Image (tube, helix red, strand yellow):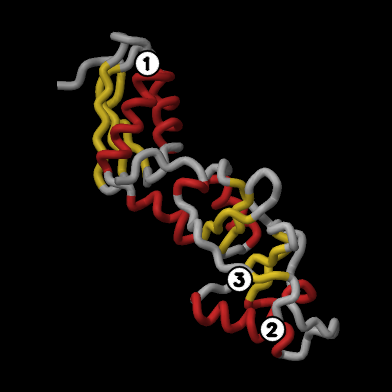
Amino acid sequence: MMKHLRTVNDVMTHAVISVDRGAPIKEIVEAMRQWRISALPVLSDGGRVAGVVSEADLLLKAQGADESRAVTAGQLMTFPAVTVTEETGIASAARLMAHGHLKRLPVVDRDGRLVGVVSRGDLLKIYLRPDADIAEELRELIMAELIPAGSAVVQVHVSDGLVHLEGTIPDPALRNVLIRVARTVPGVVDVTAARLGTEVHT
């Protein structure tokens, strides 16, 4: 079951294929082919991420556009690498990928050592969350953080990630607050609250 998916640690791949700075081009290409990945973290002697070597870096070499005579991962890599930590939020990681046109991000610990990798596909796992998990998390948020005990009756229904809120609330302004909060829950596709108001619906 998928419960509360919030951070990169909840969705990342812990087993990571990487290369060291001295890895030759043949080894890099073979690792990409074998594991069907488009980029590899390049590690320093201390296991820290020094950079990333990607198919794009190798293609520059293949088409003769690389005049640097680079023959190893350390010479070919892009640096500094764009990385995230295990505590990075899923939304933040998604923004980094989108803005940088990146397919994967190395995940590092507080000392910069590689502990995993997160891909676009990993981040999309949030949309595989069962509706029941989404509904449970949203009910907890509403009851624990937003609604004083006994002041409202809000029902949460989720179908294929679409949240429907209905019931009664003490203040009309609370409606928009609830909608915004619901949209922050991982796996939520959209939120409707047409039947959420200050009067009981029959």
| CA distance separating discs 2 and 1 | 59 Å
Spot occupied by residue 94 in the image (x, y as percentages of width and height) = 54, 52
Is the residue under label 3 in contact with that under label 2 (CB below 8 Å)? no
- Labels 2 and 1: the sequence-earlier one: 2
- Residue at left 68%, top 72%? 53
Q: Amino acid at mark 1?
A: Ile
In the picture of the structure, the residue carrying the numbered disc 2 is 25
For residue 121, which quarter of the picture? bottom left
Spot occupied by residue 138 in the image (x, y as percentages of width and height) = 35, 31
Q: Residues within 10 Å of mark 2 (few under 14, many from 20)?
A: some
- Of the 4 image quadrants, the one containing the C terminus is top left
Spot occupied by residue 132 in the image (x, y as percentages of width and height) = 25, 39
| CA distance separating discs 1 and 3 | 46 Å
Q: Closer to the camera: disc 2 or disc 3? A: 2
- Residue at left 69%, top 83%? 25
For residue 99, which quarter of the picture? bottom right
- Considering the numbered disc 3 on the image, is that residue within a helix, a strand or a loop? strand
**For this view, does 165 lie left or right of residue 123?**
left
Is the residue under label 1 in contact with that under label 2 (CB below 8 Å)? no
In the picture of the structure, the residue carrying the numbered disc 1 is 147
**For this view, does 31 lie left or right of residue 26?**
left
**For this view, does 38 lie left or right of residue 47?**
left
Q: Amino acid at mark 3?
A: Ala
- Residue at left 50%, top 43%? 7
The answer to whether 149 is drawn above or below residue 83 in the figure is: above
In the picture of the structure, the residue carrying the numbered disc 3 is 39
Please state which of residues 105 and 26 is positioned toward the viewer in this rendering.
26
The answer to whether 74 is drawn above or below residue 123 in the figure is: below
The answer to whether 118 is drawn above or below residue 135 in the figure is: below
Q: Amino acid at mark 2?
A: Ile
Total count of labels: 3
